[in-house]
Amino acid sequence: MTPDIKLSSIPLNSLRTGPSSAPATAAAVPLELLRPIAAATLAPGESASAEVLQNRPRDGQFELLLRLARANAAPVEVSVRSPQPLPAGTELRVQALSPVRLLAVLAPPAESGAAPPTLTRLDPQLFPNGTLLQARVMESQPVTGEQNRFALLARLLQGPAAGALLSLDSSRPQPPGTLLTAAVENGALRLSSASEQVRQLDLLQGMRLTLPDQAPATPMLRTLERLASLPDLPPLLQASMQQVLKHVATPEHLATPAGVAQAIRQSGIFLEASLQQLQQALSTGNAAPSQGTAENTPAAVNLPPLTRLLPLLASLATPPGTEPLPGADFKASVLNLLITLQQHLPADPGRSLAMPPGPWQPSLQVRPGLFPLPTRTVQALTENADLGGLLRLTAALLSRIQHHQFQSLGQTQTFADGSSQTVWQLDLPLRDGQQFTQVQLRIQREQQAPDQRQSEQTPQWEIRLAFNLDHLGPLQVVARLYKGRVSSEFWAEQASTLRLVNSQLEQLRDRLLTRGLEVGELSCHRGSPPQPQQAVQQRWIDEVT
């Protein structure tokens, strides 16, 4: 499969006139700081002007001394390592990518009309395979003497080399003003289809809207149980509360494979798929066996509006251990409770469902693969529990379920070679006696490309669990299974938890062996595990953009 667009050295002077006709040059240079730079000096994402003071070779690379000129601050000198020499006196524009990495772009000449740098190659350190680029076509013309070949000049709109120009060789015409969204593939660019671009933008927007408003199930369930026991509650509201509580599993229910499977099915991330399944079942049941009109064909059978359907589905909520009906799950019950609360609370145009401001993680990035989801402080809503606070906690829990759904969709895709990756990310609410907690769960299934030599490919599985129990603290588990061989990593922040888990590893190994599995490495680590490894085609969301 050939790429749609390649970086090209086609002369573009014919496209540009006057002072802007500077020769193309690969002007973006990745720099590695010899010492981490303080955020107060240059925070990630910030830019500054710089001048090269010294340049000397060192171990096959070049060690540079830069003077950073910052607005309203004294100049600062930093030492960096560069893959290419930059003579003393060179003027640069640098941007901090992280505390230990900078991106330098040669500063354009000072005269009026000077052109920004033009890239004729993509540095793999800055643009690894799978990086999504957006660029605006500035100029375009067919290549003389060749069919279906066009020379383009496009400006990068985001990323580490934003503002730089790309000299491109395209197999299809791209009028000036066209917005290109393409993925880096072995130094070339592959355009994303319009529908895929819309899908990606919709997922990004959904993640951005739901992440700040989400909160875990634990505070909501505690408040819900306390309010559900109050006398004089309207019967419909009390029934909606009890229906939510019915979906909370217990350790006994999660002790069996069937119980875990049911808890996952009823977690809420499959609600829309279940509604589609329900509609198909109703359509099949109502379809006439003989020829029919448009009114009685399966495609014409529709479900009632959600405002009428959700109470019905919530009333069908089944306790753990009972096979659920399609659409009768945790999210449906939470939605029904949200609607019922709004109906029974006095009308208040000023009431907001958003969570109140409070402590939050700084510079939290919205991206696929964010696991586990962060928690937030909602003490003010749980100490003085009332229906208004329950309404906001319910809306926050719904945002969390939706964010898990966006995360699952954002990481699920089929690649060009036929391989695929499917991700399910969710919460499992849990009641242990009088206490509520939850388990965050991420399941990843990787399927290799079809092979004519093998009738069926064996998928590779990775399962991540995240707990935060009072007596254990944060605890994460990463388990991998491939062709009957399982390995597992345990990550804990408390030393006592680490010792406890380590003392149980041999017992875990014996239990896995009795299940007929081949056991690989079982290990314990202090801290948090690395984030889930993303396939190269997935790095399409960058909050900086």
Image (cartoon, rainbow, N blue to C red):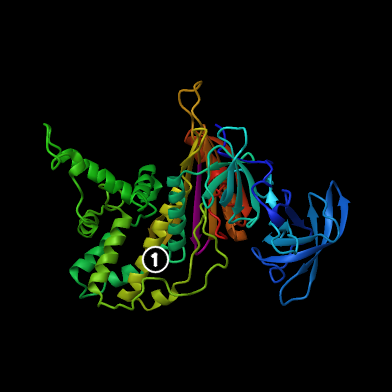
Residue 162 to residue 232: above or below: above
Q: Main secondary structure of the magenta part?
A: strand
The residue positioned 47% from the left and 75% from the top of the image is 357
Q: Confirm whether residue 287 shows in the render.
A: yes
- Residue 104 spot, x, y in % from top left: 73, 57
- Residue in front for this viewpoint, 509 or 364: 364
Element under disc 1: helix
For the residue carrying disc 1, how many other residues have a C-alpha within 10 Å: few (<14), some (14-19), or many (20+)?
Answer: many
Left or right of residue 147: residue 86: right
The residue positioned 23% from the left and 73% from the top of the image is 344
- Residue 205 spot, x, y in % from top left: 45, 58
509 within the magenta span: no
Left or right of residue 99: residue 505: left
Q: Amino acid at mark 1?
A: Ala
The residue positioned 51% from the left and 20% from the top of the image is 453
Q: Quadrant of the C terminus?
A: bottom right
Q: Which residue is mark 1?
A: 396
- Residue 81 spot, x, y in % from top left: 80, 54
